[in-house]
Image (tube, rainbow, N blue to C red):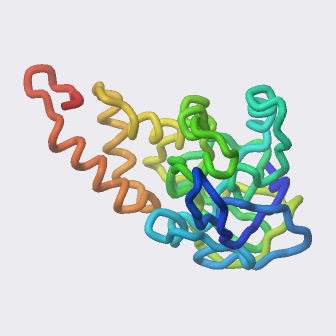
Amino acid sequence: MHLVSLNTGLPRDVMWHGISVTTGIFKEAVAGRVALRKLNLDGDRQADLTVHGGEHKAVYCYPLEHYDYWKKELPDRNLPMGVFGENFTTNGLFEDSAHLGDRFSVGSAELVVSQPRLPCYKLGVRFNLDDMVSRFLASKRLGFYLAVTREGEVGAGDEIKVIARDPNAVPVSEITRLHIAKIYNEADVDSLQRALRVSALPESWKGYFRERLENMKDSSSGFLRGA
């Protein structure tokens, strides 16, 4: 597994349906070594800190392999590295093989998988497509976030090494599915209970899942069902 491209960007104002929108989703590949700190990479910022950035979303990863899918879906588009807003364009690391709590070393830094990405409307702004968010979700090619456990320097070409796995780990793709699912079965409940024991999962996600477990209990079946 390797870091193929390191991408950063600062917030900018763009027009979207006649309204000025400030967004940090526009990223460009950078050369050389870049300092990775607790909140972000040097030279990288987020616009709306209520939903973006912070310790649990310091780095957004997106697999290079997904680009082939999007080249077919968006044949007339130029798709440079970082176009999905990712900081790390990676190879060999996918949503179904990365687990909550997985710890990696990249360069001299160490990171932990914290949560999936759930795209907001600014992905549509980036592509100037009203349906881009729904297409992105339907693709199941969402990428995921990393928190920084040790600051350091990173750069394109760095190897991504697994240094530890959480014993309660659940694949990122499974967490995304459970977040969207309307009906839970017994296996889903088991996955959620394991996820709640992963310290790297942010409290906001844990609170959402705890509420689902508490409020959607169907006593007649023993399963959880949507309201």
Tell me residue 142's x, y (percent): 60, 42
Q: Quadrant of residue 225?
A: top left
Q: Residue farthest to the top?
A: 221
Q: Quadrant of residue 45?
A: bottom right
Looking at the picture, tell me which residue is in the foreground, 95 or 191.
95
Tell me residue 13's x, y (percent): 65, 68
Q: Would residue 76 be found to the left or right of residue 216 on screen?
A: right
Query: Which residue is located at x 75 percent, y 33 percent?
Result: 70
Q: Is residue 203 above or below residue 4?
A: below
Looking at the picture, tell me which residue is in the foreground, 73 or 148.
73
Query: Which residue is located at x 51 percent, y 57 percent?
Result: 114
Tell me residue 105's x, y (percent): 71, 64
Tell me residue 218's x, y (percent): 13, 28
Callout count: 0
Q: Residue farthest to the left?
A: 220
Q: Is residue 23 above or below residue 168?
A: below
Q: Is residue 157 above or below residue 119?
A: below
Q: Can you say which quadrant of the picture contains the C terminus?
A: top left
Query: Which residue is located at x 70 percent, y 72 percent?
Result: 10
Looking at the picture, tell me which residue is in the foreground, 42 or 192.
42
Q: Would residue 80 be found to the left or right of residue 138 on screen?
A: right
Q: Quadrant of residue 224?
A: top left
